[in-house]
């Protein structure tokens, strides 16, 4: 389903609900927006490995692309 199809399906279902349930559904949807996404480490090795790049490290774009 794409976003438009989901929106249409939700609206169709909301129209069939009594007012109190429609308000409850709206409250639930708004609570989803307020939830912050769980933060997760970037990459599976974050915090497990370290690396350092020397100050005089040099590489050309071509060398980088060929590596």
Image (cartoon, rainbow, N blue to C red):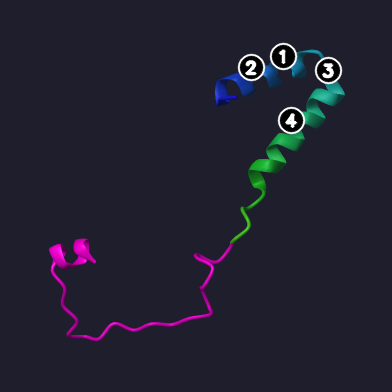
- The residue identified by callout 4 is 26
Main SS, magenta residues: loop
Viewer-nearest residue: 67 or 60: 67
Residue 12 tag number: 1
18 is within the stretch colored magenta: no
- Labels 1 & 2 near each other (Cβ < 8 A): yes
Q: Residue at x 13, y 69 (%)?
A: 60
Taking the image as shown, residue 58 lies to the left or right of residue 18, namely left
Cα separation, mark 3 vs mark 1, equals 9 Å
| Mark 1 neighbour class, 10 Å CA radius: few under 14, some 14 to 19, many 20 or more | few
**How far is the residue under mark 4 from the one under mark 1?**
14 Å
Magenta residue span = 40-67
Residue 47 counted in the magenta span: yes
As drawn, 4 above or below 53? above
User: Are there few (<14), some (14-19), or many (20+) residues within 10 Å of tag 4?
Assistant: few
Quadrant in which residue 38 is drawn: bottom right
- Of mark 3 and mark 2, the one earlier in the sequence is 2
């Amino acid at each position: 389903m794409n976003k438009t199809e989901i929106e249409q399906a939700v609206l169709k279902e909301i129209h069939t609900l009594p007012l109190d349930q429609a308000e409850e559904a709206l409250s639930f949807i708004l609570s989803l927006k307020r939830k912050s996404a769980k933060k997760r480490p970037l990459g599976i090795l974050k915090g497990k490995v370290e690396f350092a790049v020397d100050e005089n490290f040099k590489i050309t774009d071509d060398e980088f692309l060929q590596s």
